[in-house]
Amino acid sequence: MSLEITRMNPHFADVMPQEYTDLVENGPFGRDFGARDLGSFKELFEEHPMCAGCNLSLAFRIIVASLPNPADTIMVGSTGCNSIAFPQLALHNVHSLFGNQNAIASGLKRGLALRFPDKVKDVVVVAGDGATADIGLDMTLHSWFRGEKFATVMFDNEIYANTGGQESGMTECGEIRNMAPTGKKFNKISVANLAIEAGCAYVAVVTTASPLKISKCFEKAVLVAREIGPTYVQIYTPCPTNLKLKSSESVSLAKERSKGTYQFREHVSPEAEEFLAARAEKTEEQVRVTSKDEEMHSA
């Protein structure tokens, strides 16, 4: 996508919404912004209708700010709390039927590769635990089996949050939830292990207690998916509404879980490790060259 389409026709500048003007003048398109820069630029995802203290919206904000190439990225979502937020996303996106997001993304990624063979076009799936691990588990797994080159992100609040807080396959065993009044009867689905076994080149498990870690993992996932194969990032996003927590307590819960059953872990295939190392070396070389040029000009 050319950045020219984001620029305003000067004849319409006086009637354009301020939000759009701000996005053109100070948005992330064509600039090297990231999660560390949050608050200093016009974000692609800002206001939203989510509950106060919503960790899903926090994770959403972080990954959108961490996109390495937002001008040429399409996000595919599914029914869930995240789908309520998608209308506020200033980025190309697709709302799929519940559970078929990875199938939609597969066709979309292949179509973009045929239509734009010489351009980088990133596809990112963003869905909740119900859409990813329950209703859509078959399509999720088969996209990984086929080696589809896009990143999948699960917002894992361990419940069906937008329909009343029922248990999901990602709920911990024994937890009491709506429709599980005596406690869930089976273990939490180990989707990260399934992703590794299914051939994902990069897999990360993280919580909203570590925003910069989310940013780094997500960026790796998008970059590796471009060149190597499918990637997966699982983010614990506790829901204060259904867990009956104060808004200020939800991140504290994420921090607590990050020390226990939701400890950070990362899987990098040999091919992905080689790719990331080469990219890091290239970036370091570019920094050295830039610094040298700046020194020459200042002298």
Image: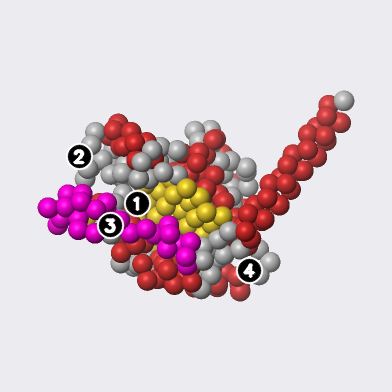
Q: Residue furthest left?
A: 181
Of helix, strand and loop, which one carries label 1? strand
Q: CA distance from mark 2 to mark 4?
A: 48 Å
Tell me the kind of residue under disc 2: Lys
Disc sitting over residue 187 in the figure = 3
Of helix, strand and loop, which one carries label 2? loop
Disc sitting over residue 88 in the figure = none
Residues under numbered marks 1 and 4 in contact, where contact means CB atoms less than 8 Å apart: no
- Mark 1 or mark 2, which is nearer the start of the sequence? 1
Q: Which residue is mark 4?
A: 116
Tell me the kind of residue under disc 3: Asn
At x 55%, y 72%, the residue is 110
Q: Residues within 10 Å of mark 1 (few under 14, many from 20)?
A: many
- Mark 4 or mark 2, which is nearer the start of the sequence? 4
- Mark 3 or mark 1, which is nearer the start of the sequence? 1
Q: Position of residue 192 (x, y in %)?
A: 43, 57
Using the image as rendered, state which of residue 199 and residue 115 is in the foreground. 199
- Mark 2 or mark 3, which is nearer the start of the sequence? 3
Q: Residues within 10 Å of mark 2 (few under 14, many from 20)?
A: few
Please state the extent of the stretch shown in magenta in the rendering: 171-198
Q: CA distance from mark 4 to mark 3?
A: 43 Å
> Is residue 164 positioned above or below 239 on the image?
below
Q: Which residue is mark 1?
A: 156
Q: CA distance from mark 1 to mark 4?
A: 33 Å
- Mark 4 or mark 1, which is nearer the start of the sequence? 4
